[in-house]
Amino acid sequence: MSDGHAEHGYISDKAKYLARLKRIEGQARGISRMVDEEQYCIDILTQISALTSALQGVAIGLLDDHLKHCLADAARSGGAVAEAKLDEASQAIARLVRS
C-alpha cells in the first residue's frame, strides 16, 4: 500500500534487504533444482523450512522498520492519519500471523 511517503522506513537498510532477498531467491531456485533432481523429501522440506524462516526474517524486519518510521511519524501527527496507520499495521501483523 503506497501512502505517498517520499521515503520508507527500510530505505536506510535497502541494500541489506536486497542482499537478503537475493539469497532467498537463490534458496528458492535451489529447492526447485532439488525437486527436479528428485532429492530426498526430508532434505527438500528442510530447505523449505529455511526459506520460510528467511522470508519471515525479512517480513519482521520490514514490519519493525514500518513501526519505527511510518507509524511513529503518524502517531506524532495524530488524528485520522495515526488511526489509519495503526489499522494498517494491525492488518499487516494479522496477515503475517496467519501465514
Image (spheres, helix red, strand yellow):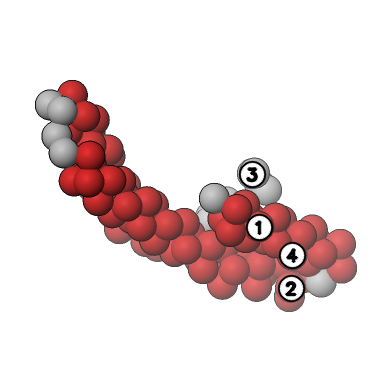
- On screen, residue 24 versus residue 85, left or right, reads left
Determine the residue located farthest toward the right in the rendered image.
79
Looking at the rendered structure, the secondary structure element under dot 4 is helix
Which residue is drawn at the image coordinates 22% and 39% (left, top)? 41
For residue 54, above or below residue 2: below
Q: Closer to the observer: label 1 or label 2? A: 1
> Which label number is shown at residue 86?
4
Q: Answer with the quarter of the image where residue 53 lies.
A: bottom left
Which amino acid is tagged 3? Ser
> Which label number is shown at residue 94?
1
Q: Closer to the observer: label 3 or label 1? A: 1
- Asked whether 16 or 53 is in front, the reply is 53
**Where does label 3 land, which residue?**
2
Mark before the other along the chain sequence, 3 or 4: 3
Q: Closer to the observer: label 3 or label 4? A: 4
Which residue is drawn at the image coordinates 78% and 66% (left, top)? 82
Mark before the other along the chain sequence, 3 or 1: 3
Q: Answer with the quarter of the image where residue 92 lies.
A: bottom right
> Which label number is shown at residue 83?
none
Mark 2 to mark 4: distance in Å? Answer: 8 Å
* Residue contact between numbered discs 3 and 2, judged by CB atoms under 8 Å: no
Residue 11 image point, x, y percent: 43, 57
